[in-house]
Amino acid sequence: MAYYVDLNADCGESFGNYTLGQDEAVLSYITSANIACGFHASDPLVMEQTIARCKAAGVRPGAHPGFPDLVGFGRRQMKVSNDELKAMLIYQIGALSAFAAAQGMSLQHVKPHGAMYNMAGKDAGMARAICEGIASVDEELILLGLSGSEFEDAAKQAGIRFAREVFADRAYEEDGSLVARTKEGAMITDEEEAIRRVITMVKEHRVTAITGKEITVVPDSICLHGDSPKAVLFAKRIREAMEAESIITAPIERVIANRGV
Amino acid sequence: MAYYVDLNADCGESFGNYTLGQDEAVLSYITSANIACGFHASDPLVMEQTIARCKAAGVRPGAHPGFPDLVGFGRRQMKVSNDELKAMLIYQIGALSAFAAAQGMSLQHVKPHGAMYNMAGKDAGMARAICEGIASVDEELILLGLSGSEFEDAAKQAGIRFAREVFADRAYEEDGSLVARTKEGAMITDEEEAIRRVITMVKEHRVTAITGKEITVVPDSICLHGDSPKAVLFAKRIREAMEAESIITAPIERVIANRGV
Amino acid sequence: MAYYVDLNADCGESFGNYTLGQDEAVLSYITSANIACGFHASDPLVMEQTIARCKAAGVRPGAHPGFPDLVGFGRRQMKVSNDELKAMLIYQIGALSAFAAAQGMSLQHVKPHGAMYNMAGKDAGMARAICEGIASVDEELILLGLSGSEFEDAAKQAGIRFAREVFADRAYEEDGSLVARTKEGAMITDEEEAIRRVITMVKEHRVTAITGKEITVVPDSICLHGDSPKAVLFAKRIREAMEAESIITAPIERVIANRGV
Amino acid sequence: MAYYVDLNADCGESFGNYTLGQDEAVLSYITSANIACGFHASDPLVMEQTIARCKAAGVRPGAHPGFPDLVGFGRRQMKVSNDELKAMLIYQIGALSAFAAAQGMSLQHVKPHGAMYNMAGKDAGMARAICEGIASVDEELILLGLSGSEFEDAAKQAGIRFAREVFADRAYEEDGSLVARTKEGAMITDEEEAIRRVITMVKEHRVTAITGKEITVVPDSICLHGDSPKAVLFAKRIREAMEAESIITAPIERVIANRGV
């Protein structure tokens, strides 16, 4: 039996005169990129360049839509109607798709950003609006979202594929949700432990929750960070660890196609 | 021999809590709609609704991209690089395309808005950037621009179709350019005269310039306004005059396909 | 004994090419204007013009700061930090103050807008941040907020004056809060009844809650709307009713100075 | 006879999640800071923090208003009306003034940013609109602008003081204007030469133009950059060179007060 997993990271978060992230470095370790679409970060030129970098690196691009909140970087909760939310998704996916098309690529997936990701993961109505937005543009797009969240059921209902995302550096509650950052022990700061946990998740479909209990988790994709030299170094290490463990790192689409093979 | 002409107007220029235009009324008289894409006007919900209204009215939708200047409504000149301009086009066309796709439609054309339209009509580099942006997203999209402007040659070079736009309410210089609004006689205020001029342009391919000389003009589309009850009334009258003269009003695509038939 | 009350309405909510409200009409009936500051509505030119209109009409201007959400008109809840909130207040008050100063006027009051008003009225931390922002710019500024809300105590702690606002067209709960719009009976649709309620509040300091119980309310200012011809007509009627009842309509500052006289 | 000169640099250009510049380092070498006001860069929290840093460093704060173009960082030419321009100035100066007032400071000066600075320096109408905006808010504010530009006369007409700015790293034409960046020799890349030129300008009121001819220049302030470690190092060197030459570095206001002493 072969093990597959995708490594994803946020890319293309620069904006005008402002540069953010270590895109070129991180793109050499990941297999799927979540690309900002101009609402919480990015602009048309940055989107064009980020698609070009994905193409050069052989990384599959996906849309990373967020709330329309540049100054808050999409991290502030906004109470929008589900109709607005669906329309925001369509708009942002469409904009990024055009850059992909212009360079002979197509989008693989959609991963909501920041507060939108966190809110919709726990709100069935928001999750459904997001999935309907995605499906209405292109039913081949895969939703990448938190494993065990509201996204999973919403994707099924909307008829689109769902990829389960896990976090190497975050602790889990017994119900599979992430331990809130405000709680002690929420972050896995020991890199060796983080890598061991990822390997166990991928190969054995389990992880030790913060309570000590083992829970089941079947990851399709691991979320990495790319916003600092240290984060890039961790991406490199996790990529190497996957290879050492004979885990095949591949884009989401291929991981899903090989589930249970 | 049959005569064809398209009637186009700007639609979908509302924004959030702000309503602008008489979209539903004007959509019953036009054959192609130029839909704002969120940079100079509109927002995701308005774009979704405007596509729906086009569908209901049987009007072909097109993108109406503008400069990123909401407060100036895209009417203020901005000096952007041609790379930025091209990327702005791709972004806005992509965003609107997704709303069209979500409702089972596709975009027919692209007409730059406001200051972008005016600047690029006289600037070969800008016109080329716009056409390259359009062609890179979809070579089937038609550029709708001022007859006799820099757009015409740029479209040919980019391999996309060009539709020649004329204005019923504007006077022309001998070289086929519009008389500047600041000049006396720039506006054709007599509606009967405006309609007669349009009919002559469509049937006889000529119009009397402000100097008195007759010049050649071969219109594919007539630009109408939809921002006031009076403008809507004029749209109705021109539509009726076309019928009375056995001129077939049809979307740009069909007008172009029937050129010279 | 003389009765005083202020009549306030939101003004200056136009934006660029978009016109909103019936400012000139409503300004002839009110005594204090809440002027948008460019975050949820308005732009520099509109702010300048609105100050000029207040000056011409003899109406005292106040700042109407909102969340940075033009497309949502400041009506969507945003979860911002209290530090951000305080800084937003300082920014917006400062911007409007400069237009007032440029025309030889000064701001009388500050009334938070939309979602900011509703959220902070129930959130002591937000109310405090708002009051600290106001006080740090100018301790003479009066906070205009919902009677009986968190604003009242926060203003006291920050050392600024508080003006109690009531709504002619809204029903009240027994605790003095507004009945949620989603509840039946939330809106007072009968204009005669609305006017009678206002008179009773001003003269007798009481109003009948939705439960039928009489509660105490001591209004300094009545909130009017100015966004439709019908709203303007109601403003005219309430102004006339005040005069008929010998209630003196005066700007907030004067109402407060005459409390209990 | 004593020599005085001000050292100014742009500060507070970060935005939300994006950090730009080396503010804390550069603030230890300059005497006046030009602080972005939210149109081309910055946000309310950044403005608050930058005023605090100026206060801590003993640096006089000034407003650095720009065009409303975040993605273009205010560097793209925009054709706005003079009324709009004046209103933009009032808005931005007012917003920053409030942060200064909240921390017990007042603004010393205003220096237009980027494309606004460059356009207005050659356009008497724009320069006048800017000066009228400044004067209408506070006649004590000093305009900091290019020596020999349209700003000089416009400030006089508006009744505000003007501080002449020179650039250590730029070559001059015979008429005192800057050599366009596109021309060879436009930049003074040798730091020793740049410092020598500054000293000659301050002490002897002359500089060698790119043609070889000596021209007269009477500088009040030298523009420094703060956007890179190298720029900060140059600021340190120029500050030290001033001290070695017994040139007193002082805020604009004091430099002007000591002119010709």
Image (tube, coloured by chain):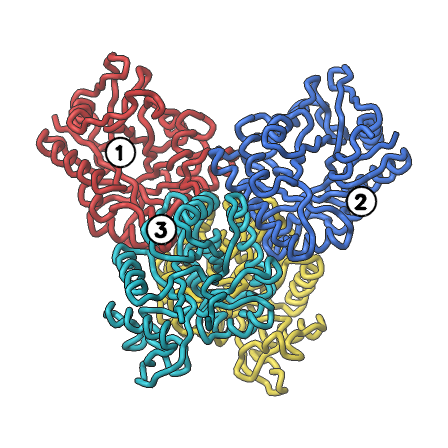
Chain colours: A blue, B cyan, C red, D yellow
Q: Residues within 10 Å of mark 3 (few under 14, many from 20)?
A: many
Q: Residue tagged by mark 3?
A: B23
Instruction: Measure how far apart labels 3 and 1 are at the Cα level.
Output: 33 Å
Which quarter of the image is occupied by the N terminus of chain A?
top right
Q: Chain of mark 3?
A: B
Which type of secondary structure does the marked residue at label 3 adopt?
helix
Is B75 in front, or is B9?
B9
Q: Residue tagged by mark 1?
A: C223
Question: Residue A172: x, y in percent?
Answer: 71, 23
Question: Residue C255: x, y in percent?
Answer: 22, 33
Which type of secondary structure does the marked residue at label 2 adopt?
loop
Both on one chain, marks 2 and 3? no
Q: Amino acid at mark 1?
A: Cys
Residue A219 sits in which quadrant?
top right
User: Contact (CB < 8 A) between labels 2 and 1?
Assistant: no
Residue C153 sits in which quadrant?
top left
Residue D123 sits in which quadrant?
bottom left
Both on one chain, marks 3 and 1? no
Q: Residue at x 51, y 74 (%)?
A: B150
Q: Residues within 10 Å of mark 1 (few under 14, many from 20)?
A: many
Q: Residue tagged by mark 2?
A: A29
Q: Chain of mark 2?
A: A
Instruction: Measure how far apart labels 2 and 1 are at the Cα level.
Output: 59 Å
Instruction: Measure how far apart labels 2 and 3 are at the Cα level.
Output: 50 Å
Which quarter of the image is occupied by the C terminus of chain A?
top right
Total labels drawn: 3
User: Contact (CB < 8 A) between labels 2 and 3?
Assistant: no
Both on one chain, marks 2 and 1? no
